[in-house]
Amino acid sequence: MATDKLLIQLSHPHLQKLEVAFGCAVGVGVIASGKQTGRVLSLTSLSHGLGFTVPPGYEFPLHASAPGKALIAWLPEKELDAILGRYRFTRYNENTITNRTAFKKHLLESRQRGYTTDFAEEFDGCHCLGVPILNERNYPVGTIWTTGPTKTLTAHRMPLFAQRLRKAACAIAIALREKNIHNPRMYQAEKIRDAKRLLESRLPVIGFTVENAAVELHVSYSWFRKAFKQETGLSPNAYLLRLKLAHAKRLLRTRKQSIQGIAERLGFESANYFTIFFKSKTGFTPSQFRQRYSFRRF
């Protein structure tokens, strides 16, 4: 995406300087579209010493990595709850936080502190430190982080490193804002990327509508509807229905929730309307789909 390319471009000089200052790899990343993982946009390759590096496109967990935590710790509470409500807490080792309540408390503490940490929670011998890149609404649009061996990236050094990372994140955010102000096309692309992420996270929230999304994005619904169609080829309502269809399939395959319960959960007027919609899109009624595809991967 254009915004991702711009993030890479604007963060590059900061990553290089910080790598030299820290003696650790430094990266920039975003939430992976349509997934519950983070995605590396760029990570420096250490020119000296020992460290950890991965290629662009590498996906990292949200619960066991500093950049992953930085991408969600600053989210609005409803959006965070929606993500955590269906998040799978994979255990990598004894350091991994796998309890939802404990993890949410950990995120709150990280937000109050101003940075996130990972003390070998995914990879033994590896520490990470992350901060969010916040837009004008204090919404996280990305993260910048550093990663290194436990002997290099120590708890003692983290507050100082975090200060440097926050300064860089602020500079990147200001540059992004200036680019967007003078580039309506870029502004629209960023808004619709935020909108897609918002619709995905609010899907389990009963009664949430595309009009609500426009309000949360601080744009008029008429602009939102037109811009969304230009960026995605779909109206916001059509996109939301496609998300609901995909989520309904997951619920029908993996849960023993009633058809009525699924219909209510996804905001359909009735189980009958949900059945008509589902059959028009799949050729099966929800009951037929569940009978045919439960406990099968496809």
Image: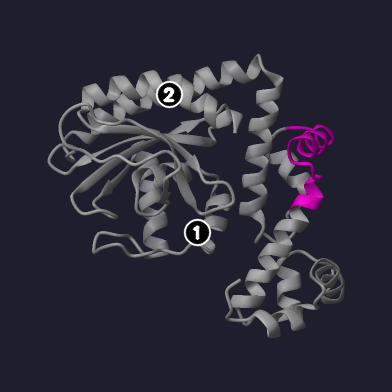
Looking at numbered disc 1 in the image, what kind of residue is underneath it? Leu
Q: Position of residue 107 (x, y in %)?
A: 39, 49
From the image, tell me which residue sits under label 2: 11
Percent x, y of residue 130: 35, 38
In the displayed structure image, the side of residue 218 where residue 87 appears, left or right = left
Label 2 Cα neighbours within 10 Å, binned few <14 / some 14-19 / many ≥20: many
The residue type indicated by label 2 comes to Ser
Task: Give whichever of 6, 114 is nearer the camera.
Answer: 6
Q: Which residue is mark 1?
A: 84
* Count of marks placed on residues: 2
* Spatial separation of the CA atoms under disc 1 and disc 2: 29 Å
> For numbered disc 1, what is the local secondary structure?
helix
Q: Name the image quarter holding the N terminus.
A: top right
Which secondary structure dominates the residues rendered in magenta?
helix
Classify 282 as above or below 62.
below
Residue 207 occupies quadrant: bottom right
